Amino acid sequence: MRIGLALLCFAYVLSQFYRTFLAVLTGPLAEDIGAGPEDLALASGLWFLVFAAMQVPVGSALDRVGPRRTAAVLLLVGGAGGALVFAVAQAPWHVSLAMALLGVGCAPVLMAAYYIFARVYPPALFASLAAAVLGIGTLGNLFAAMPVTAAAETIGWRATMWVLAGISALTALGIGVLVTDPPPAEQGAGGSFLDLFRIPALWLVFPIAIANYAPAAGVRGLWIGPYLREVYGAAPATVGWAATAMGLAMIAGSFAYGPADRWFGTRKWVIFTGNAGALLALVALILLPPMGTWSTTALFALLGFCAASYPLVMAHGRAFVPDHLAGRGVALLNLLAIGTVGLTQVASGRLYSPGMTPPEAAFQPVLLLYAGLLALALAIYLLARDRTD
């Protein structure tokens, strides 16, 4: 079980990598195949939208056939296959197709690990275990920053994607061999996603599940690069370091949130306070004048740290879900979180207004989208019922 979970954790590293690596390839992709920020916003959004749509079949598959086959098959077909399509891309729409396939491949890996945690380990440990996987997996953010920048400059972005296709295939095969499925739930594998909507307490957790991840994922996955280049004229290496700093902050935030519900005896107020901090970072980016590359990077890092509440939000929602719906429950919460990232990424590409003066004004509609969404979610979440295990 531990070796299998380690492989699922590594697969989640790949998932985090694939959702964020476009931010540091915007330059090479623009030069080689003519893909601009709007094209890459669409491609990034498709990754998240396909990933989110896959949560419905993934949730059912986890409850019916188990995490081993679900994760292995989809990662092999979508993960390795998507990386191969990316490696041979000749036009922006090829990148969009590749990102959609990668969304299919990455869709089950985190939920497979969370399903095992929900079914095998004590409920009180769910948030800490979920945060540990998320924190380790977020190393993919770091690999998608300076290492990808260096690899693209050394062997080219196409060769880099061929290597990643091979790594994805080997990881999928390892999962198929080494992951152990938990025993069936005592109540059987019945029920459906509709049963989850009959749980009143979940309705007030849904808004924060929808909004908590989108701002950090959107900024780290795409907008940090264009923002620093256009506002400050930052070089690729500087963008890589800034993306690394935000990635490190997201890792630190994940580990900080994990045991916080046990430290403070509450999930709701830890989640609320942290996301309020993320909202303040967004408001500062919108209202304050440019303060320099590293001061702005510090605000991006603050956003990443405070918005890393995803595992605790999952634990809050999971606390209201019965065991026989565990797979569907974590998948539904994941669908809401990732689906919102996809929708906001696509919308952000349309809100982005290049050529404006001052240059930071081009990004203010994007930041306002994230801030408004988070503010609305926090207002509704105030009514949610707190629950710990």
Image (cartoon, rainbow, N blue to C red):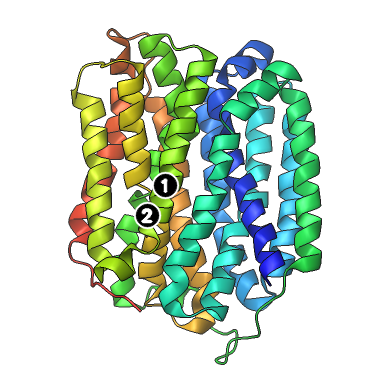
What's under tag 2, amino acid-wise?
Ala
Q: In the image, what residue occupies the spot 41% across and 40% down?
A: 249
What secondary structure is marked by label 2?
helix
| Position of residue 97 in the picture relative to residue 362 (left or right) | right
Picture coordinates of residue 40, whole percent (x, y): 55, 27
Q: Which mark is residue 256?
A: 2
Q: In the image, what residue occupies the spot 32% across and 62% down?
A: 260
Q: In the image, what residue occupies the spot 65% across and 80% down?
A: 182
Note whether 257 is above or below 68 in the view shown: above
| Position of residue 56 in the picture relative to residue 66 (left or right) | left
Q: Quadrant of the C terminus?
A: bottom left
Q: Which residue occupies the foreground of this view, 357 or 21?
A: 21
Residue linked to disc 1: 252
Note whether 217 is above or below 152 in the view shown: below
> Residue most toward the front?
263
Q: Residues within 10 Å of mark 2 (few under 14, many from 20)?
A: some
Rounded to the nearest whole Å, what is the CA distance between mark 1 and mark 2? 6 Å
